[in-house]
């Protein structure tokens, strides 16, 4: 039976990073609402619980709470930052507001030898991010570490198996942080680890076969790695009972249809059905400019196309799609909680409520790098596995304003120049996404001594681990110059190119 660690999310920007670090240790974990009850958590059966950080203050009356009955359940608990402070408050410790925030690099001094800090030395470099701090731990807890500004940088009760750290062990700025997490997982919680992608595939195949039975599955292929791995995994489970449907929705990248046909008929043969529905999608998008409405329109149109194809091939009971864990997290509206909905994802929030299919989403508990690992285990070609993420709604969410044939053609051609030039750069393997965006503005220019009034293209290049956070990439000027020159000279209707230098947060990766 799979070991599970529960990460209770108090609104931290690092909650997903905590989950990733735990999974890197070979232990499966899930991110859950901070106010989950002991009974609900008990149904999941976690072997350990981690309380995330968060932007709130435990000194405020309306701070996010937890079901304190969890602390009496005998499950090992680790509180991080806000999680430490919440533990201290709920268990009777003393806190005070700091006169100044302690933010950034710091060094903690280890006061007591303990399993949590085994093998990391007596002085450890860490990353701090807090204002409030604990000045006296609860009864039965020992101070394990301190800094000059923080008297309780770590505390723990060996008897209760409850620990807390004021710093963030999950970030790379805490160099020994992963070792500290391992000490908690294996030394304190007694987990055995061993969660691998090969094991995930075996478990998923059994689950899919049981779920599908004698039914039939249609799987929406988008051209990205997520849907491709989904199709390959379900094909491994049910074979010809699955039909992979690739819909040409009129807002794909240049040459996308031919590439998908080649991959899934020659390199990795599947039961493939290609549907030309570009006219239908563009008709349904006519006059639509609101990003959320675009996603809803596209999601509904996909379902209409899938339903028609299911009828044509003799019926289907299930619809499979490549929803990932970040999609679920980012689309989830934490009702009454500290996290907010950023946008609905095509795979999550863009489906109609009266969906006639039962959903199969075998990757919805995985991060992107884990999906790529599954793809390798399944034998998918590396060229496909390493493809950059591409949004389900396609270029429609990279065209700000109305989506029509003229705008699609302009963006396809501009994006092609971006890809042709950026792939030549030695830094390309470290890029998460690189693409063009068509802006809903025009600017004055001069071409051939004549005044022009044409479109503006924005270039977006970011680095990321999982898409939850991202930094803009400092692409060399000469490469940006070549991209700009080619777009302006070769793409009719464009006379200006700009570069997006915003990170996520506060921006999102896609512009819509």
Image (cartoon, rainbow, N blue to C red):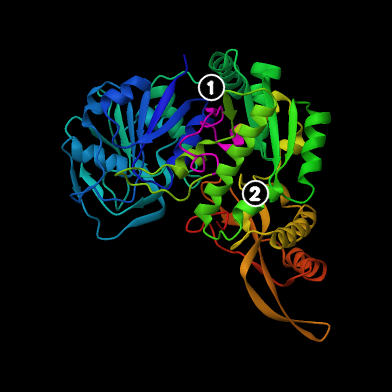
Q: What secondary structure do most residues of the magenta stretch adopt?
A: loop
Horizontal placement of 171 versus 254: left or right?
left
Quadrant occupied by the C terminus = bottom right
Give the camera-side residue of 84 and 183.
Answer: 84
Give the camera-side residue of 381 and 444.
Answer: 444
Q: Position of residue 305 (x, y in %)?
A: 64, 38
Q: Position of residue 90 (x, y in %)?
A: 19, 37
354 in magenta = yes
Q: Name the residue under label 1.
A: 195
Crowd tier of the residue under label 2, counting other residues whose Cα lies within 10 Å: few below 14, some 14–19, many 20 or above: many
Disc 1 or 2, which lies upstream in sequence?
1
Distance (Cα) linking label 1 and label 2: 41 Å
**Judging from the image, what secondary structure is the residue with disc 2 in?**
helix
- Number of the label disc, if any, that sits on residue 224: none
Q: Residue 492: which quarter of the image?
A: bottom right
Give the camera-side residue of 344 and 153.
Answer: 344
- Number of the label disc, if any, that sits on residue 281: 2
Task: Please report the bounds of the magenta region as a residue range.
Answer: 346-370
């Amino acid at each position: 039976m799979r070991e599970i660690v529960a990460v209770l999310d108090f609104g931290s920007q690092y909650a997903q990073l905590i989950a990733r670090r735990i999974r890197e240790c070979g232990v499966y974990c899930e991110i859950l609402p901070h106010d989950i009850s002991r009974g609900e958590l008990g149904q999941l059966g976690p072997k350990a619980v981690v309380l995330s950080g968060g932007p709130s203050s435990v000194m405020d009356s309306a701070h996010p709470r937890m079901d304190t009955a969890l602390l009496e359940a005998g499950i090992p608990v680790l509180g991080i930052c806000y999680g430490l402070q919440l533990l201290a408050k709920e268990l009777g410790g003393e806190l005070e507001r700091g006169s100044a925030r302690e933010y950034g690099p710091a060094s903690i001094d280890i006061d007591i030898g303990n399993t949590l800090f085994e093998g990391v030395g007596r002085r450890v470099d860490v990353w701090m991010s807090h204002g409030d701090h604990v000045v006296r731990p609860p009864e039965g807890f020992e101070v394990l570490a301190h800094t000059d500004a923080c008297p309780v940088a770590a505390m723990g009760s060996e008897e209760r198996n409850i620990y807390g750290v004021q710093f963030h062990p999950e970030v790379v700025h805490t160099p020994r942080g992963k070792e500290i997490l391992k000490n908690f997982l294996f030394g304190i919680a007694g987990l055995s680890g061993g969660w691998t992608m090969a094991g995930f595939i075996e478990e998923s195949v059994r689950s899919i076969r049981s779920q599908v039975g004698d039914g039939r599955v249609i799987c929406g292929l988008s051209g990205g790695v997520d849907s491709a791995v989904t199709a390959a995994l379900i094909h491994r489970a049910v074979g010809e009972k699955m039909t992979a449907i690739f819909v040409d929705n009129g807002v794909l990248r240049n040459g996308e249809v031919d590439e998908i046909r080649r991959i899934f008929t020659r390199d990795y043969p599947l039961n493939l059905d290609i549907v030309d529905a570009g006219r239908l999608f563009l008709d349904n998008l006519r006059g639509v400019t609101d990003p959320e409405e675009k996603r809803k329109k596209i999601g509904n149109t996909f379902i209409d196309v899938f339903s028609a194809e299911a009828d044509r091939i003799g019926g289907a009971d299930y619809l499979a799609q490549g929803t990932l864990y970040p999609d679920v997290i980012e689309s989830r509206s934490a009702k009454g909680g500290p996290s907010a909905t950023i946008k609905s994802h095509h795979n999550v929030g863009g489906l109609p409520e009266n969906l006639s299919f039962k959903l199969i989403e075998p990757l919805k508990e995985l991060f992107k790098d884990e999906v790529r690992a599954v793809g390798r285990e399944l034998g998918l070609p590396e060229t496909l596995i390493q493809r950059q993420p591409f949004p389900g709604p396609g270029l429609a969410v990279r065209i700000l304003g109305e989506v029509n044939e003229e705008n699609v053609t302009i963006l396809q051609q501009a994006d092609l120049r971006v890809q042709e030039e950026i792939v030549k750069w030695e830094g390309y393997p470290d890029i998460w996404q690189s693409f063009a965006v068509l802006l809903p503005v025009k600017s004055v220019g001069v071409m051939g001594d004549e005044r022009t009034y044409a479109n503006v293209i924005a270039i977006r290049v970011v680095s990321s681990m999982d898409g939850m956070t991202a930094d803009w990439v400092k692409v060399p000027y000469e490469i940006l110059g070549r991209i700009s020159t080619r777009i302006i000279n070769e793409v009719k209707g464009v006379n200006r190119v700009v570069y997006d230098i915003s990170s996520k947060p506060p921006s999102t990766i896609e512009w819509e």
